Image (cartoon, rainbow, N blue to C red):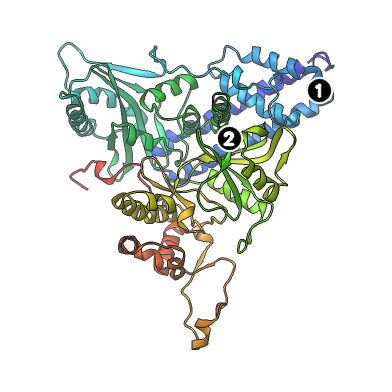
Amino acid sequence: MDRITEKNAARHAAGIILESFEEYKTRFSEITVRAEARFITRDFHGGRKDALERLDLYAAIVSQTVMKVQESVGPYLDQHKNGATLKRIFGEMVALREDTELAETFFNSIARKIFSIVGMIPSIEFTTPDFKIPMIQERTCYICRSFLVPENDITVSGMMEKVLEAFREKLNLQDIHTDAAKIAGVIEKHLTRLYGLSRIDYIEVIESVFYRQKAAYIIGRIRTNMRISPLIIAFLNGKEGVRADAVLLTDRSSSTIFSFTRSYFHVMVQRPSEMINFLKSILPNKRVSELYTAIGFHKHGKSELFRELTRSLAISNDRFEIAPGEKGMVMLVFTLPSFDVVFKIIKDHFEYPKKTHRQAVRDCYRLVFRHNRVGRLVDAQVFERLEFEKRRFSDALLEEFRLHARETVTITENRVTILHLFTERRIRPLDLYIKEESEPFAMDAIVDYGNAIKELAACNIFPGDLFLKNFGVTRHRRVVFYDYDEIALVTDCNFRRIPKSRRYDDELSSEPWYFVGEHDIFPEEFKTFIHLPGPMKQAFEKAHGDLYTVEFWQTMQARIKTGEVMHIFPYEKHKRFKYHSD
């Protein structure tokens, strides 16, 4: 290596960053490729360890790279003298790669830390104009395999046998003929209902299998009559081996599989932009940022989200404003009406009776990031040192910043700088939803609210606050949880019955007559927090009255502690196939 000088420092630094990115991609792939063996051998605990290892990988490599650059080139790097040169050289190095966008995002992660960037500096980091908006269009698919209809007009079942045969080894499939017949039956009914016939022109499937928790998925699309339908086949590995469990053919059911409330897939991706192009063709309502995140590239997903926000600000005139609904005691929440994301800032001081602190809140959000979200926890992205034009904030919101967020928000004459910002997909708060929707929808939501609590418990999550305002309803009318400042592991909680009072005066006292430990929870008290109108209360208690009992929670604790992995299905029970041995 040449002696490092100010003249060649940028090239040396660019080389270190690219080498580190290669290390990240190699280790990312090494972890991801294990998913196939984990699924086939039913090593679900090993799969969980892999998920955690991969989630922590990016931050670890970035920290390691920043240290390398600072130790090797730091004295010769200067934001003003050679920052732009560093960006240009790195851009040239990665311009012809199949994963250029991921490399440029990795560069930004390093550059922002090395140069302590606040806001955006287009001359030394890749910003919105540098990144190409993925073109969702008809083109040759390099990541998928096509199955054409031959001249003898093969049946749908025959076509599906050919599809499954292509995945026999990867999935260790047991009975392709039976699985294909069941899948074909659903497809034929679906196409007949939509188009009046069940003929397929051809099928395309992504060659890589998508793995998550205890399931594996073949992702594809059906082309018929110049139309595209999603094709997602779910597989489980049970006592009789690997069998198809369901086939999903609509935008709604497919979107749920790729929901922002679910953990990321483990899937081998050689051409990220091609993968996104394919997925966008069957999930047109999904943001590009959400799709990148879903396939494991959460840092680039976050970068795409910020670019989507930047583009939205450029073509709109609305202002950030205080979010509707009841104000939070811990977080200051605001929205941009034209952009379906909520923004959250930790308040300087928390209102009574909250006893938590700033770092504890951050830890709760990190717990959610690293946890199995089972379709009930909204994914949150964390941004640092952002800067916006002051004119894009309402006067009421600016006043909230001054009153409650001085430690996080700096307001100058023309700019607003936010030190630490959480973002989540915007959904309707459950307390508002049940007031605004018709009774049937409200009743369904209340029952699903109980389902959400139970499914969270099954994956070792206790929400802490069970108030309706902390839950929301997605566009597919699914209830999810999004307020994490008091979240805890079920196994860390001590579920107790309220001791009998010693005398009548005890029950009239404003203070409990019994000792309450830091982790003690009394399920009987949940009725106090869950305020529901009469009919909704009756429906909830009929379906989920066991949530008020210690037995439910202690049984769930016992199942978790024995190592049981409870699978939460991302599709309705009626979509599951039935086999003779079920």
Front position in the image: 159 or 104: 104
Question: Which residue is the site of mark 1?
Answer: 78
Q: Determine the image quadrant of residue 80.
A: top right
**Mark 2 packing: few (<14 Cα in 10 Å), some, or many (20+)?**
some
Q: Residue at x 44, y 58 (%)?
A: 562
* Disc 1 secondary structure class: loop
Q: Residue at x 33, y 25 (%)?
A: 220
In the rendered view, tell whether residue 10 sits above or below residue 482: above
Q: Residue at x 45, y 23 (%)?
A: 276
In the rendered view, tell whether residue 337 sits above or below residue 405: above
Asked whether residue 22 appears in the rendered view, the answer is: no
Question: Which residue is the site of mark 2?
Answer: 319
What's under tag 1, amino acid-wise?
Answer: Asp
Q: Residue 346: horizontal and vertical position, in percent?
A: 64, 48
Q: Residue 400: horizontal and vertical position, in percent?
A: 65, 47
Q: Is residue 348 left or right of residue 50?
A: right
Question: Do callouts 1 and 2 mark residues in contact (Cβ within 8 Å)?
Answer: no
